[in-house]
Amino acid sequence: MRRAALLLLATALPACIVVPRTTTVYDQDCKIEAHHMELEAQQVGYFVNCRNEGCVAVLAASGAVAAASMVVSGSIVVAGNVVYWFQKQGNCVR
């Protein structure tokens, strides 16, 4: 019963990755366009026709890819936001 529930869950889950996204807003105080990075989840597909151990392998692989994309993209976002902060401080005219 538990295995059947896991297989049903595995076939219903979408495959997702996490990617960095840059947004631009106008900062009234500094009178410049300021950039900011954030994480965004992107759906890349669904599991279909998944059977037995194949589902477990696909689910494990997609989990590993999602975790890896989160770590890499998270690092890019942190580094990018630090750079954008320094850029804003250097260009800010108050």
Image (cartoon, helix red, strand yellow):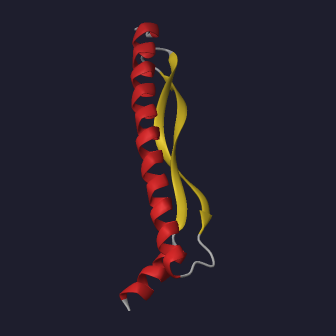
54 up-or-down from 60: above or below: below
Tell me if I can see residue 93 in this picture: no
Q: Nearer the viewer, residue 84 or 25?
A: 84
Residue positioned 49% across, 53% down in the render: 65
Residue 93 figure quarter: top left
Where residue 57 appears, as percent x and y from the top left, is 49, 68
Q: Nearer the viewer, residue 18 or 59?
A: 59
Residue positioned 42% across, 8% down in the render: 90
Tell me how many marks there are. 0
18 up-or-down from 35: above or below: below
Name the image quarter holding the N terminus: bottom left
Residue positioned 62% across, 63% down in the render: 45
Where residue 83 appears, as percent x and y from the top left, is 43, 19
61 up-or-down from 3: above or below: above
Residue that protrudes farthest toward the left in the picture = 2
Residue positioned 47% across, 30% down in the render: 36
Where residue 58 appears, as percent x and y from the top left, is 52, 67
Q: Nearer the viewer, residue 64 or 81?
A: 64
Tell me if I can see residue 9 in this picture: yes
67 up-or-down from 29: above or below: below
Where residue 70 appears, as percent x and y from the top left, is 43, 46
Name the image quarter holding the C terminus: top left
